[in-house]
Image (cartoon, helix red, strand yellow):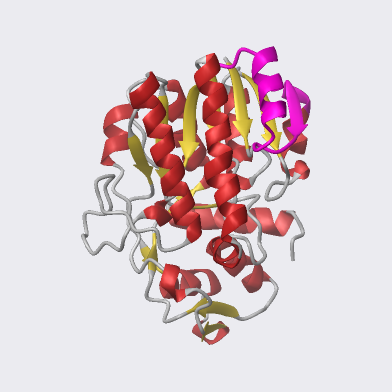
Amino acid sequence: MNILLTGGAGFIGRSVAKRLLADGNKVWILDDLSNGREENIEEFKVDLQDFIVGDIKNEGLLEDLFSKIKFDICYHLGASINVQDSIDDPRTTFNNDTLGTFYILEQCRKHNVKVVFMSTCMVYDRCMDEKGITEEHPIKPASPYAGSKIAAENMVLSYYHAYGLPTVVIRPFNTYGPYQKTGGEGGVVAIFIKKKLAGEILSIYGEGTQTRDLLYVDDCADFVVQSGYSDNVNGEIVNAGLGSDISVNDLALMIARDSSRIEHVEHIHPQSEIQKLLCNYDKAKELIGWEPRISLEEGIRRTEDWIKTSHLI
């Protein structure tokens, strides 16, 4: 198939692109490199149909692209993804995540292209149910990032109901693995591993009792890709996660293996914290036969090996 992948030079986008190419698809990547990095796709860049450095808010660019190429699916991963940035500068996040998604939807509507929209587990309200968060769980936009994603989700689903356009909203839980940034904008696993390898203290925001459901990036990419291939999820919201959660305290100890190398610091955005994140992925299993394959221990090992070999310390 002909596939447009926005945000394809990002951490998750890279793995999605690699999987799509392995499946024999023709892939075009559109990325403004605000979060992504061109070196992320260096190993398979030659196999792409094109790598376009551009903005999803550039309507002229999108019109030209969609008129020239008959796409079958648009995997829309391009977005502002940092919660703190959205609190400091909500306009940029809204424009990228909500308005940018609208521009993508308009082109897909005109050319009848399926849309796979990457949302986030950060849209959910806190959950104490040990069965985990289902797609019916209440939402709570605790940050402009979550609010922008919810607004975009509603637009994506409205195009399914109003126009019959095949669309799906996917909500992966906290994804980690190789190629994730190891600095301030990275994920907790990558940051903790880098600090451990560098002999530094692992800093935990708040009490560290908050839990995360950590999904390895290859499992996430498999979920993203399958959501595009299947008609069973059209018009649906679908979760993906490991199905088990771990407190940030326990995660730090698993990685550092030494409690003396862990400290607690004041939370920088406690109002947007979700105390418990545990995914129920029954719907993904039922509709597309997806379930995660990589355990947390194995995923951490693979991520640590990548950080070592990439000389990121």
**Which residue is at 73% across, 45% downward?**
33
Q: Is residue 158 above or below residue 293?
A: above
Q: Which residues are magenta?
A: 46-72
Q: Quadrant of the C terminus?
A: bottom right
Residue at (53, 17) in percent of width and height: 110
Residue 294 drawn in magenta: no
Relative to 63, say whether 156 is above or below: below
Closer-to-camera residue (303/288) = 288
Question: Is 252 left, or right, of 274 in this rendering?
Answer: right
Q: In the image shown, does 258 or 223 lie closer to the viewer?
A: 223
Identify the residue at image location x=37%, y=31%.
158
Q: Position of residue 59 (x, y in %)?
A: 67, 30
In this view, 162 is above or below 7: above
Position of residue 30 measured from the top left corner of the image (x, y, whole percent):
69, 33
Question: What percent of the width, then of the height, locates residue 94?
Answer: 55, 51
Q: Is residue 294 visible?
A: no
Left or right: residue 132 versus residue 171 is left
As for residue 55 lying within the magenta part, the answer is yes
At 58% from the left and 77% from the top, the residue drawn is 202
- Residue 141 image position (x, y, % from top left): 39, 58
**Of the pair 243 and 135, the residue shown nearer to us:** 135
For this orientation, the residue located farthest to the bottom is 260
Q: Nearer the viewer, residue 177 or 294?
A: 177
